[in-house]
Each structure stands twice: as structure tokens, then as C-alpha cells.
Amino acid sequence: MKTVHHALVQNTPGVAIELQSLHFGTPGRGRKATLQAALHADEIPGLLVAHHLRALLAALEADGRILGEVVLVPVANPIGLTQRVLQGVEGRFELASGENFNRHYADLFDEVVQRVEGRLGADASKNVVLIRAALSEAAGAIPAHNALESLRRTLLGLSIDADIVLDLHCDSEGVLHLYTETSCWPQVEPLARLLGVDTALLADVSGDHPFDEACSTIWPRLAKHFGDATPIPSACVAVTVELRGEADVSHAFASRDAQALVDYLAWQGVIAGAPSELPPARCEATPLAGSIPVKAPHGGVVVYLHECGARVAAGDRLADLIEPMSGLVTPLLSPVDGVFYARETRRFVPAGASVLRVAGREALRQGKLLTS
Ligand SMILES: [Zn+2]
């Protein structure tokens, strides 16, 4: 294992922050996978999964079983981890800018088109090599004037030339679920089965350039732009994996999840020893536009009546919202048939807050599909 230290641009003289990446296997030989944990810095389950992954990958490397290259970023957001406010950590938004750490990744489309124009041909695999080199160059040239911009540039640079990108997050409270681009689904379905996710949410574009889409969506766009004479496959499978809820931090979960991720890398040919068969699917994929939030019509105490993972029908009473001053009790009903897959940790919410989400089969929403 090789550790690489990436110094981020310093916001304040004398205050240095660095990102570390752990490299297993051999760069340039075989397929490449990058996994990163806690881009939203307060989503801790991924940090523990990364800890278990490090040991598994080191053992695999010692056995000569890493066929390609695996890059593990065990703490993807050291900026967020330093943002202590009173007794908590604000890990989702950068305090200086208010920006979500998992949004606003660079769109490298124009830069890559300029770099490969006139150089692509009829050989798809040669096109992939050319485009990956152009992507890495373009990512390295992204301007970075502060720590956040240099964090985004560095993370993108570690993943942009990978075959597989797994971004480990978690929800407030929830069951295992994942987000991916629609065209990636056939490649992601085995991951869903190995992890045992209860919800898989698909979108072509979910809005505001999250990390996974910055890595994967450029490939089908380039294919469309250059046309059939220069075949370009969707060469990057990128997934946001939601490792249950923020308090679901245990060795039992993390060791199981880390093994499932390693099994997936083996299924993808990055590691030797692919599983002979996959577990049965626990769910079918549904559109991200069919994931419907239920918002609080007024402030109050939330009392849940179902656990996450429940299969529910439209109209089922999922929670009560109680206004203690007036005694008002407002039932919060499921908006659709589907899986009640995530809910808010806080048990007192202000008016307008998203309290819970149900994944249904029908795409009922439009526009920006992710929560803020
Ligand atoms: Zn997250």
C-alpha cells in the first residue's frame, strides 16, 4: 500500500489541511476503482467501512490478488471534519460558503472535447484511453483558489479516470440504499444485491453536479457528441452508497459492508476471486424522481409509527406531528406506494422541513432531485 499526501490550498496562513489517498495494486494495470468515505464529513459509517476496507485490501494485496488498482480515500472531507460548531460537526455544508460538499463538481465536457477532437477513431478501447488521459489533464487544470476548490479538484482527479467509483455516504436514519445514473444500473445491480440494498434510485441527471455524476455522466454525453463512427462506451460506473443512518456505526455493519464492496470489485474484475453467485435482489430499481419527501406542514414533535424499510401504501400513517402548545396532531401519510427508506433524526422539526421519504415506482418529481 502506498499513501499519497495531497496538500490542500491553505485558506489561512499556518493552517494546513491535507487529504490522504491509499493506493493498492498497480496503476495502469487492469481496471481501476476508487472508493471514498464521508464526503459529507459527519456521515461516519463510511469512515468505519474504510477502516475495514484498508485491512481487507492490504491482505488481498499481500496475496497478489489485486489485479488492477484500488484507491481508497479513507477521509474524503478533512475540511468538514474540522468544522466544529459548539459541540457538533457541520460536515455537509462548508461554513464559509454555505456550499454542499457533494455538489458543484466541475463539468469537464468542453475541455475534454477540445483535447480529443480529431484524435478518436473506430476502436472503442483506444478512445477510452485517450479520453481518460484528457479527463485527468482537465481535472488537474481545474482552478482552485481555496481549500474547498482544491478538495474538489483533488477528489475528482483521483476518480475521474476510474472504471468504478464508489462514494460512501449515509442518510439521517435509513436503510441501505444507493443512487446511480440510469445507464449505470446494469453494472450496479450486482452491487445492490451484494450489499442487500432495500432501495436503488436512478436518475439521468439529478442536479447541481454531485460527485458521482461528475465521474459517470460525461461518458454518454461524449458518445452522443462524437456519434457512432467513434464508439465511446460508458466507461465509468459511479455510485453513491448510503450506508443506513448516521448512528449505524458498528463493526458488524462495517465489516459486512466492506466485504460486500470487495466482492463487488472482484465481480468487476479489479480483484481476483469473483463471487460464484450473487444473492437475490431485495428490491427493484426505482426512479429518483419517484422518491417523494413528506414535509412538515407546521413545526412540532415527530413520532414515527413505522421503521425504515417498511413497505407502505399510499395513505398509510407513517408519523404523527404534534404541536404541543395547541395539542394539534397532524398525521403524516405516505404519498405513494413504496419503500419508507429514510427519515429525519431530529424529533422536533420546523415547518417545511423534510421529515421522511418514500421511494415509489412512478417519476412524479422534476427539476433538482436531491435534497439540499
Ligand atoms: Zn451524504
Image (tube, rainbow, N blue to C red):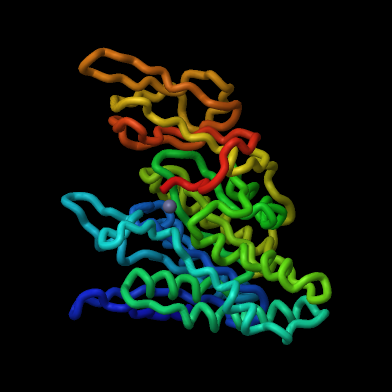
The residue drawn where x is 19% and y is 80% is 13
Lateral position of residue 252 relative to residue 236, left or right: left
The residue drawn where x is 67% and y is 77% is 30
Residue closest to the eye, 22 or 60: 22
- Number of numbered markers: 0
Residue closest to the eye, 66 or 121: 121
Considering every residue shown, the one lying at the far bottom of the view is 119
Considering every residue shown, the one lying at the far left of the view is 86
Lateral position of residue 128 relative to residue 315, left or right: right
Q: Is residue 198 visible?
A: no
The residue drawn where x is 16% and y is 51% is 86
Residue closest to the eye, 203 or 272: 203
Lateral position of residue 222 relative to residue 88, left or right: right
Considering every residue shown, the one lying at the far top of the view is 327
The image shows residue 363 at horizontal and vertical percentages of 63, 38
The image shows residue 198 at horizontal and vertical percentages of 58, 39
The image shows residue 61 at horizontal and vertical percentages of 56, 74
Is residue 260 positioned above or below 246 on the image?
A: below
The image shows residue 44 at horizontal and vertical percentages of 37, 53
The residue drawn where x is 48% and y is 78% is 1
Q: Is residue 284 visible?
A: yes
Is residue 43 positioned above or below 162 on the image?
A: above
